Image: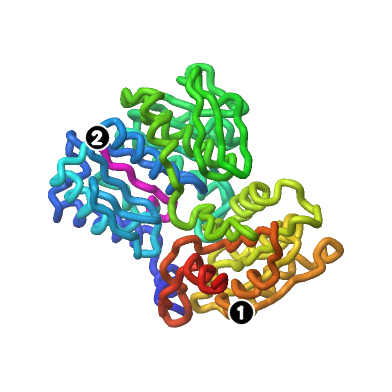
Amino acid sequence: MTTKDFIKKFIPAFILSAYHYKLALFGAAIFDFPGLNKNLKIIGVTGTSGKSTTIDFITRILEEAGNKVASISSIRFKVGEREWENKYKMTMPGRFVIQKFLRQAKNAGCKYVVLEVTSEGLRQFRHKFINFDTVVFTNLGKEHIESHGGFENYRNAKLEFFRSCRNIHAINADDENSKYFAKTPAIYNLQFTIYNKFLNSNFQTLTAEDVVVNQYGVSFKIQDTKFQIPLLGIFNVYNALAAICVAQNYGVSLDVCKKALEKAKGIPGRMEIVQKDPFMVVVDYAHTPDQLEKVYKTLHPKPYTLNPNLICVLGSCGGGRDKWKRPVLGKIASQYCDEIIITNEDPYDENPSQILSEIKSGISNFQFLISNVYEILDRREAIKKAVELAKPGDTVVITGKGSEPWMCVENGKKIPWDDRKIAKEALQ
């Protein structure tokens, strides 16, 4: 049993909550409560998918409008022109890190701060003593279910974040869970949509029309302004809509939004194209069933076609994280991919072979669709195998880690890692 497991099992929840709250208070006090400064407009983005890209889009637009912006995502820290990599392997860093960052943003003269907010971070009060001006809901899928003790608890953690901010709410009205977020009171209620699925009549609505998704990126129209963004996947339309919705509420014009987003080159490890020809190689962070299916649909929109082939490299995180999803990931891969290579991801203290076996159990019922399934524990060798299998016109997609700089193995050890670098080495 790890120290973390021991703490969770034997220390009462209310004591852990008090401990985390006091840490949040102490962290804020050390840096003189920068998150409560009225001169900082702080924007929080939460949801299962799209947070990092949405933060990148919001930052780009606000900067294009002439503002100095700071932001934290799972990818990077940014204060004005200065950027550095997020190496914590935490989407939402700890309380002291966040409070120090907010102090840096304030001292640098930033007007806006954009933060990625997670359910795990919320449970540990990392959002406390931060006066969020706007909160954004991207979408909700199954993640951290075992950690939270059920999907409803996971959703409620994010709802509590919305309840704690009563100023500006922006929600994805096409997500079926948006109805819960729409009920939380706010002074200004905003919603963005493509399909007008779950609209609220009293919300200010931003609608994308004439949406086109192809191998060159995405395009859509808002009123009379046409956007063309060189990023793959309809999910990037939603990420863009979330950013535009927030920016417009701060007085930024559609023309400025268009100018900023059409310069977007994507962010590391999110549908990142490592090679285009003679076959495509893509690295993506997708690690939940919903994310994985969206990636596969984007890269191989007609499942079961034999040519070109979609070759996937996938694993699943260890450490007791969402074990339920492992066979589900295998099942999804078998529905969309022509060659499947199951490999190590971040096993932590779990048996890597057992994790691979659980993923493969979801594939077994679909063997009539899959002729080639490989189990290769060494992730480097797995990526190399995928490249060897690829023929001109095929697509290799490597999921699960994105741009993460580490692989986490037993006894708390971290091995330096980068899927993109490994893929490039294999290609050479």
Q: Nearer the viewer, residue 164 or 211?
A: 211
Disc 2 marks a residue whose amino acid type is Asn
- The residue indicated by pointer 2 is 67
* Residue at the spot 70% in from the left edge and 51% down from the top edge: 300
Crowd rating for badge 1 (residues with CA inside 10 Å; few <14, some 14–19, many 20+): some
Q: Amino acid at mark 1?
A: Leu
Residue farthest right in this picture? 368
The residue tagged 1 is 377
- Image position of 374 (left or right of 286): right
User: What residue is drawn where x is 37% and y is 51%?
Assistant: 73
Query: Residue at 55% of width from left, 77% of height from top?
Result: 350
The x, y position of residue 99, in whole percent, is: 22, 52
Q: Quadrant of residue 328?
A: bottom right
Secondary structure category for the residue under label 2: loop
Percent x, y of residue 72: 33, 50
Examine the structure image and report whether residue 117 is included in the region drawn in magenta.
yes
Q: Is residue 331 magenta?
A: no
Residue 319 in sight here: no
Crowd around label 2: few <14 · some 14–19 · many ≥20 (10 Å):
some
Number of the front mark, 1 or 2: 2
Front in this rendered view, residue 346 or 405: 405
Q: Which residues are magenta?
A: 112-122
Q: Is residue 230 visible?
A: yes
